[in-house]
């Protein structure tokens, strides 16, 4: 989605360059900061791969051009002053050259961001079905077996809430959420769809 009026961007303020904040499109984690000129922005829009202007190399630079760890552009937005760009992207591999998901370190993502990562992992397991994976076994067991597991975990979570300590409740709740993600994925439903339902109800 491009919610960006290219003609209103204030290129003069940064002498032809604008700072670009790159955010994970699902988790909300801030991945990196870079700079774009008009040509880099146009290439990002047209190619779908986030492209920057490298101030050190004095040329356009597509993230992942040497490592293969591309950033797939999902949306482009400008801030209220039209002098900073927000890119929401799907990272292919680690974003940082040090091998971490974010250039700001492993602790930079929002507290609930791991739910989005887990949902994406479940989706990969559903597609790839790696041997030896518990999630693969669940998918191969079919909807009824997965639904049964959700029911079992729901009961265990309720029992832990009334008869066990907080650690036990956290553990059972984690089991319930994981199996619910698998059930949703087996029915072709993304976690974002459920969040959208919650958001609609909230409104």
Image: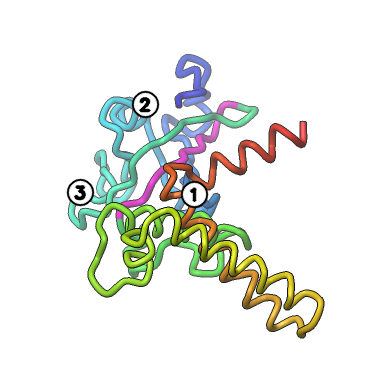
10 Å crowding of disc 3: few (<14), some (14-19), many (20+) = few
Are dots 3 and 1 in contact, CB under 8 Å? Answer: no
Q: Nearer the viewer, residue 178 or 71?
A: 178
Are dots 3 and 2 in contact, CB under 8 Å? Answer: no
In x, y percent, where is residue 47?
26, 30
> Could you tell whether 33 is left or right of 80 in the image?
left
Quadrant housing the N terminus: top left
Q: Residue at x 66, y 74 (%)?
A: 156
> Could you tell whether 87 is left or right of 193 in the image?
left
How much space separates mark 3 and mark 1, taking CA atoms?
35 Å
Q: Which residue is mark 2?
A: 38
In x, y percent, where is residue 158?
73, 70
**Which residues are the magenta region?**
82-92
Instruction: Give the number of the disc on residue 65.
Output: 3
Q: Residue at x 63, y 74 (%)?
A: 172
Residue 87 lies in magenta, yes or no? yes
Answer with mark 3 or mark 2, whichever residue precedes in sequence. Answer: 2
Are dots 2 and 1 in contact, CB under 8 Å? Answer: no
In x, y percent, where is residue 88?
47, 40
Q: Nearer the viewer, residue 90 or 177?
A: 177
10 Å crowding of disc 2: few (<14), some (14-19), many (20+) = some
* Element under disc 3: loop
Q: Nearer the viewer, mark 3 or mark 2?
A: 3
Answer with mark 2 or mark 1, whichever residue precedes in sequence. Answer: 2
Q: Quadrant of residue 133?
A: bottom left
Q: Which residue is mark 1?
A: 184
How much space separates mark 3 and mark 2, taking CA atoms?
19 Å
């Amino acid at each position: 989605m491009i919610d960006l009026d290219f003609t209103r961007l204030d290129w003069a303020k940064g002498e032809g360059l604008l700072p670009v904040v790159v955010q994970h499109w699902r988790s909300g984690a801030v991945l990196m900061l870079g700079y774009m000129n008009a040509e880099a922005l146009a290439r990002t829009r047209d190619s779908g791969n986030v492209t920057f202007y490298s101030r050190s190399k004095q040329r356009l630079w597509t993230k992942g051009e040497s490592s293969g760890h591309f950033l797939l552009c999902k949306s482009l937005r400008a801030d209220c002053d039209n002098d900073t760009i927000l890119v929401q992207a799907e990272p292919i591999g680690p974003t940082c050259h040090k091998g971490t998901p974010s250039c700001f370190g492993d602790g930079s993502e929002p507290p609930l961001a791991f739910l989005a990562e887990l949902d994406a992992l479940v989706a990969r397991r559903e597609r790839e079905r790696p041997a030896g994976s518990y999630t693969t076994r669940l998918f191969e067991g079919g909807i009824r077996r997965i639904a049964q597991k959700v029911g079992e975990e729901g009961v265990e979570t309720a029992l832990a809430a009334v008869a066990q300590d907080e650690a036990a409740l956290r553990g059972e709740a984690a089991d319930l959420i994981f199996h619910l993600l698998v059930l949703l994925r087996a029915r072709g439903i993304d976690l974002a769809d459920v969040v959208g339902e919650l958001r609609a109800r909230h409104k």
